[in-house]
Image (cartoon, grey):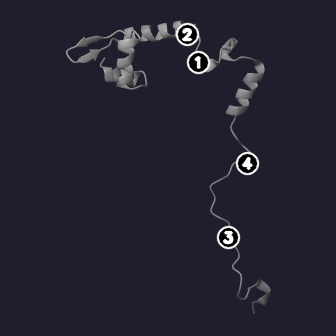
Amino acid sequence: MSLEDAAAWLFTTPETVSECIKHHGLPAAKIGRAWVLVDVDVIDWLRRQYEKAGGKCGSTNGKKMGPGGLTSASTARELDDLLAPRIAGRRKNLPPRLRAITGGKKSSVSDRP
């Protein structure tokens, strides 16, 4: 894959991928003026980056995960509450309420002849 393809695949920029090739050991070969990467090598390199970090992912804050990836039963309940559909208090797309026009004579059924 090209440098641009690798950047899109890693959700980053070609400059960042080039930096990783030059300074962080991302395996690539320079063919002419273009860098060429092999997808399996990129995956292996990315997995090694996790190992260098001690096998920790930055998004977990170092918490130990329980079964199913949740830290506790209370966390599971909190997650269920957050993901539950909102039923009450939801605003519906309705036309604006009609307001009475003030001034002038009001007609009523009893005023009619």
User: Please, what is the three-letter code of the amino acid marked with disc 1?
Assistant: Gly
Of labels 3 and 1, earlier in sequence is 1
> Which residue position is annotated with label 2?
53
Q: Tell me the residue at 48%/7% (across/down).
A: 48
Of labels 1 and 4, earlier in sequence is 1
Q: Position of residue 95 (x, y in %)?
A: 62, 62
Instruction: Please tell me whether mark 3 or mark 2 is closer to you in this view.
Output: 2
Of residues 34 and 38, which is closer to you in this image? 34
**Contact flag, marks 2 and 1 (Cβ < 8 Å):** yes
User: Please, what is the three-letter code of the amino acid marked with disc 2?
Assistant: Ala
Q: CA distance from mark 3 to mark 4?
A: 22 Å
Q: CA distance from mark 3 to mark 2?
A: 62 Å
User: Please, what is the three-letter code of the amino acid marked with disc 3?
Assistant: Leu
> Which residue position is annotated with label 4?
89
Mark drawn on residue 58: 1
Q: Position of residue 50 (x, y in %)?
A: 52, 10
Up-down relation of residue 86 to residue 7 (above or below): below
Instruction: Please tell me whether mark 1 or mark 4 is closer to you in this view.
Output: 1
